[in-house]
Image: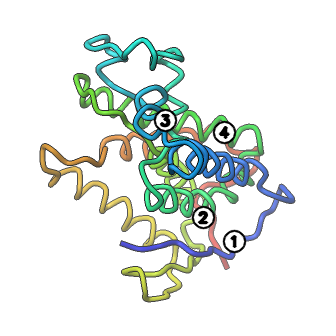
Amino acid sequence: MFIPLHDGNPLRFVRFPYMTTAIVVVTTLVFVLFQSGIVIDALNASALAFGVVPAVLTREAALPTELDVIPGSATLFTYAFLHGDWMHLIGNMLFVWVFGDNVEDALGHLKFLVFYLLSAAGAALTHILMAPASEAPLIGASGAAAGIIAAYLMLHPDVKVWILALGRIPLRIRAVWVLGAWIAFQLFSLLTAAPDDQIAWWAHIGGLLTGAALVVVMRRPGVPLFDRQP
């Protein structure tokens, strides 16, 4: 659909987005070290052990003993640091990098980390609610990134964002149109998805709703919603 490049939205409260940077670095390292096959080829094992398997959390199925290494509730957070391939990783991390710094600025470092993890958990719980018997592991930061997108849209709808439309056309468009189009695409895809679609569209919706709710209560005192840009 489009690739976000840069928003040119200055930070107001923090000098550097440490948590956004840490999330991108840690997530990338996890993929390179354990999932890419460059160091260790543990893509399938890590997805089952640390991804969200709805049937396991609803106790309709169980993991093999050797993969049952952490409590099921912990996978509501760990799954967001796993990805299936390079495009999956890069796509999610671009959204986190471009839009996460200003959300971190509005919330503060530690609150942003909590926000990110709760957005991931909200996305996973929505996915479980809609597919409780699924034995396919849910992995990826899409749900957490959706929370960031919702928060950014509620904080800075008028900021102009540089994107690559259709992967090749550079455009500078207001965030309300760019991110609004992304949200509309998620809803359209959810309504038209085939039964065997491999993309967890409900997780994206859950992340959006969680992020929208959290930014209202977690933003710094005095940080307005729907900030008007000159």
Q: Secondary structure at mark 1?
A: loop
Q: 64 or 157: nearer the eye?
A: 64
Q: Are marks 1 and 2 in contact (CB under 8 Å)?
A: yes
- Vertical arrangement, residue 29 with respect to residue 3, above or below: above
Where residue 94 appears, x then y in whole percent?
56, 63
Q: CA distance from mark 4 to mark 3?
A: 23 Å
Q: How many marks?
A: 4
- Disc on the earlier residue, 3 or 2: 3
- How busy is the neighbourhood of tag 4: few (under 14 within 10 Å), some, or many (20 plus)? some
Q: In 3D space, how far apart are the residues under numbered discs 1 and 4 (Cα atoms)?
A: 20 Å
Q: Give whichever of discs 4 and 3 has the lower sequence position.
A: 3
Mark 3 and mark 4 in contact (Cβ < 8 Å)? no
> Disc 3 or 1, which lies upstream in sequence?
1
Q: Which residue is mark 2?
A: 156
Identify the amino acid type marked 1: Asn
Residue 218: mark: 4
Which quadrant of the figure contains the N terminus? bottom left
Residue under label 1, please give it.
Answer: 9
Q: Earlier in the sequence, mark 1 or mark 2?
A: 1
Kind of residue sitting beneath label 4:
Met
Give 199 or 163, whichever is nearer the viewer. 199
Q: Residues within 10 Å of mark 1 (few under 14, many from 20)?
A: some
Q: Which mark is residue 79?
A: 3
